[in-house]
Amino acid sequence: QVHLVESGGGLVQAGGSLRLSCAASGTIFSIDGMGWYRQAPGKQRELVAVLTNGGSTNYADSVKGRFTISRDNAKNTVYLQMNSLKPEDTAVYYCNAGIRQRLRERVELYWGQGTQVTVSS
């Protein structure tokens, strides 16, 4: 089994910073892309940032220049550094990862349970 556990959410004032972490554990042979999504109340889940195994990144236009995604492959962990936070960044943030549990098995997509980020004005 595989688990993704997020941490680092909380309450911050506008203009502040937070760093989210997401650690994958369990039976893991390899991890492909890892990413962050968010869902605000009454809205659909949306992409925030993704990072491929090759190092390519993709960001939502709304966070470009403010958020940075990175990963530590040795720790099976992906991070999201969020700077210059705005009230509209308030949401539950979820990480996901494409994980192959064993050699010759296909890659499956796993999700974390989410962590709340609240930005006050």
Image (cartoon, rainbow, N blue to C red):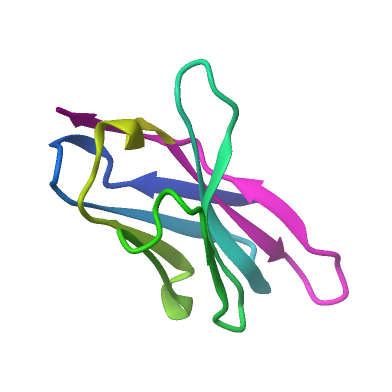
Residue that sits furthest to the front in the current view: 61
Position in image of residue 26 (x %, y %): 58, 58
| Residue 109 image point, x, y percent | 71, 52
The outermost residue toward the top is 42
Q: Residue at x 44, y 58 (%)?
A: 23
Q: Is residue 29 above or below residue 47?
A: below
Side of 26 relative to 86 (left or right): right
Q: Is residue 62 above or below residue 13?
A: below
Q: Quadrant of the C terminus?
A: top left
Q: Is residue 82 left or right of residue 110?
A: left
Q: State the extent of the magenta-drawn residues as a range.
A: 93-121
Q: How many marks?
A: 0
Residue 54 placement, left or right of 105: left
Question: Where's residue 29, x and y in %?
Answer: 68, 73
Residue sitting at x 66%, y 71%: 32
Q: Name the dominant secondary structure of the magenta segment.
A: strand
Q: Is residue 45 left or right of residue 109?
A: left
Residue shown at 35% from the left, 56% from the top: 21
Instruction: Tell me residue 59's x, y (percent).
Output: 50, 60
- The verdict on residue 106 being magenta is yes
The residue lying toward the viewer, choosing from 10 and 14, is 14
Q: Quadrant of residue 67?
A: bottom left
Q: Nearer the viewer, residue 18 or 67?
A: 67
